[in-house]
Amino acid sequence: MKLGNIILPQTACLAPMAGVADRAFRQICREHGACYVVGEMASAKGLTYGDKKTPELLEVSPEERPMAVQLFGDEPDTMAKAAQMALAYQPDAIDINMGCPAPKITGGGSGSALMKTPELAAQIIRAVRVAVDLPLTVKFRKGWDSNSVNAVEFAKMAEACGADAIAIHGRTRAQMYAPTADWAIIRQVKEAVSIPVIGNGDVDSVDSAIRMYEETGCDLVMIGRGALGSPWVFGQIRDYFFTGERTPDPCLEERMAVMLRHLTLMCQYKGESHAMREARKHVACYMKGLRGAPKFRKAAGELCTLDDVRRLIQEVKDQNPEL
């Protein structure tokens, strides 16, 4: 898939996830095979009005390239200005969030609420397109609800307004993250536009990635929640598409080493105290399927230092010697 001057292999990329896809997680996913990553959504108003927390969401590490910063907002001029300001962080692409279903985002008319106002969405895409020369992508959903499924029309509009690629999540805003994503709508979008289409929703393994490519014809698969606690899924998908071979899941020693590496990066970028508070949800995900997982997930909520993490890892190994 070509995104501007960036050539992306047909493997899998990391979806933007608020509160999850920070620099540390993006870097871990790149290290384990993600061909491209998208950062946490950043408020255009927050950036242009000088909010102190917003710049952290835009910081880019050399190890995570190629990557896109993602902006959200409902004012064309503000989005354009924010996109120009984001250039200072030297991203490889700009992504516009028109798919977030969170009430605090949609309540202000941003995120997936823009699927109800396609005229405004068009103004935003055009304004950002004029403001920056970087590759521009737009992420959106199937529609607002079952009575307003407009992904195909929305995709055509995004293309006409200058988007270089689009990413579509196969659920409406009303569905949030359940039930099963509708991959048929991704195929319909792919057949309706000439720009690259990135498919998103319910991919968490080699087999599901294969099926999405086959069933939708998309140019690239995007993984979000399916990578939580298992960033090596990107490498497994890459290895299969590059060599035809299936890489086994990591053993417990390797799994815990990845987790420790992930949390160490978080501490490096955010400081230990801040990082440990945010790391607890990641630790819980790394514990999936292990003997004693409920106890370990509870213990994750009490982690304060990397030494606490190392002690927890030893407990996990002691209770799962066969892994």
Image (tube, rainbow, N blue to C red):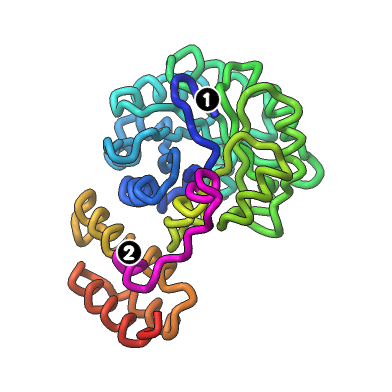
Asked whether the viewer can see residue 109, the reply is no
Specify few, some or many for label 2: CA neighbours under 10 Å numbering under 14, 14-19, or 20 or more.
many
71 versus 180 height, above or below: above
Q: Please report the residue visible at 27 percent of the width from the left and 64 percent of the height from the top.
A: 260
Using the image as rendered, state which of residue 309 and residue 105 is in the foreground.
309
In the image, taking residue 307 as reference, residue 300 lies left or right, namely right
Where residue 322 sits in the image (x, y, percent)? 40, 84
**Magenta segment, prevailing SS (helix, strand or loop):** helix
Q: Please report the residue visible at 29 percent of the width from the left and 83 percent of the height from the top.
A: 315
Using the image as rendered, state which of residue 261 and residue 309 is in the foreground.
261
Q: Mark 1 or mark 2, which is nearer to you?
A: 1
Q: Quadrant of the C terminus?
A: bottom left
Quadrant of the rendered image containing residue 205? bottom right
Quadrant of the rendered image containing residue 163? top right
Residue carrying label 1: 2
Using the image as rendered, state which of residue 254 and residue 177 is in the foreground.
254
Q: Which element carries disc 2, helix, strand or loop?
A: helix
Q: Please report the residue visible at 27 percent of the width from the left and 35 percent of the height from the top.
A: 62
* 242 part of magenta stretch: yes
Specify few, some or many for label 1: CA neighbours under 10 Å numbering under 14, 14-19, or 20 or more.
some
* 144 part of magenta stretch: no
Amino acid residing under circle 1: Lys
Asked whether the viewer can see residue 295, the reply is yes
Range of magenta residues: 238-258
Gap in angstroms between the C-alphas marked 1 and 2 = 32 Å
289 versus 234 height, above or below: below
Q: Please report the residue visible at 40 percent of the width from the left and 65 percent of the height from the top.
A: 281
Which dot marks residue 259? 2
